[in-house]
Image (cartoon, helix red, strand yellow):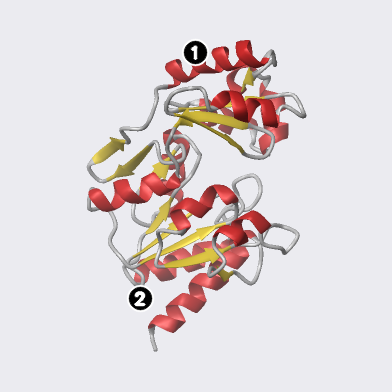
């Protein structure tokens, strides 16, 4: 099967820790480009961060930002009807803090040094990470998960997810909505290959014709992701090195 597009998560999948684009990935992207196959990032990153990534990849100029809040293409931005502006999300976070009694700290209120420690980002990239239009990352106390999850269900059309140390409040959309937006607007066509490393990627991987599960740094696939996508292929190595190796295998299979 020759893919028409490669949809991919970024951090821990295509990128190394700290957002580094490794040389094996650069070579794999160049190979895909030679075959006319775009690389389409689906990320929780902001639109500003996504545009920086798209310039660096130089692999089609198409992608999705803030977990399916919108897509970027040659014609501009298309925002999901499920997306909620960050000002409204801030009000909902305040309501969540009031109901739970927890101190919920938006990332925008943290010192830059603390954000760098949590994310591994260099200081100069923090403003782009904070330039959110439709998602609100925040910190919550340890042990708050059960109460937060229960309380968030009372907020209308809102989704609460957890990344590493940050929680994320958004409209009720995910990367699976990005696939629908991309296809509906003619930005990608099938067959689609998807790459991901976390449970947050399961929704869009389930919509792809081929799903590739990228191991974590330990070498093991996230058990929740594997449970959700049991028929997925497993990349031979973690992060970008595994991504590149799996792309090479797919292109070799397409020649047969």
Q: How many marks?
A: 2
Element class at badge 2: loop
- Left or right: residue 118 versus residue 231 is right
Quadrant including the N terminus: bottom left
- Residue in the picture at 75% in, 60% down: 218
In this view, 35 is above or below 178? below
- Does residue 130 sit above or below 224 in this rendering? above
The C terminus appears in which quarter of the rendering? bottom left
The 10 Å Cα crowd at callout 1, few under 14, some 14 to 19, many 20 or more, is few
How far across and how far down the image is residue 59, in percent? 38, 57
Under circle 1, the secondary element is: helix
- Residue 234 visible? The answer is yes
Question: Could one spot residue 9 in this view of the protein?
Answer: no
- Tell me the residue that label 2 is attached to: 2
- Of all residues, the one furthest to the top in this rendering is 98
Q: Which of marks 2 and 1 is in front?
A: 1
Q: Can you name the residue that lies furthest to the bottom here? A: 256
């Amino acid at each position: 099967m020759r893919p028409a597009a490669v949809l991919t998560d970024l951090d821990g999948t295509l990128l190394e820790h700290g957002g580094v684009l490794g040389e094996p990935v650069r070579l794999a992207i160049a190979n895909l480009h030679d075959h006319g196959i775009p690389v389409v990032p689906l990320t929780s990153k902001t639109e500003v961060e996504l545009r920086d990534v798209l310039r660096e990849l130089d692999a089609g100029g198409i992608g999705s930002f803030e977990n399916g809040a919108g897509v970027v293409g040659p014609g501009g931005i298309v925002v999901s009807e499920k997306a909620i502006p960050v000002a409204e999300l801030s009000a909902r976070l305040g309501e969540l803090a009031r109901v739970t009694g927890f101190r919920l700290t938006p990332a925008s209120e943290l010192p830059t040094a603390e954000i760098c420690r949590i994310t591994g980002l260099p200081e100069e990239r923090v403003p782009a990470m904070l330039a959110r239009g439709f998602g609100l990352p925040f910190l919550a106390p340890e042990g708050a998960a059960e109460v937060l999850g229960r309380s968030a269900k009372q907020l209308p059309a809102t989704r609460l997810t957890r990344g590493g140390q940050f929680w994320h409040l958004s409209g009720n959309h995910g990367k699976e909505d990005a696939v629908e937006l991309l296809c509906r607007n003619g930005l990608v066509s099938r067959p689609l290959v998807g790459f991901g490393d976390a449970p947050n990627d399961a929704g869009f991987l389930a919509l792809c014709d081929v799903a590739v599960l990228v191991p974590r740094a330990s070498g093991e696939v996230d058990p929740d992701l594997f449970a959700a996508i049991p028929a997925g292929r497993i990349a031979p190595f973690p992060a970008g090195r595994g991504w590149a190796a799996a792309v090479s295998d797919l292109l070799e299979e397409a020649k047969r």
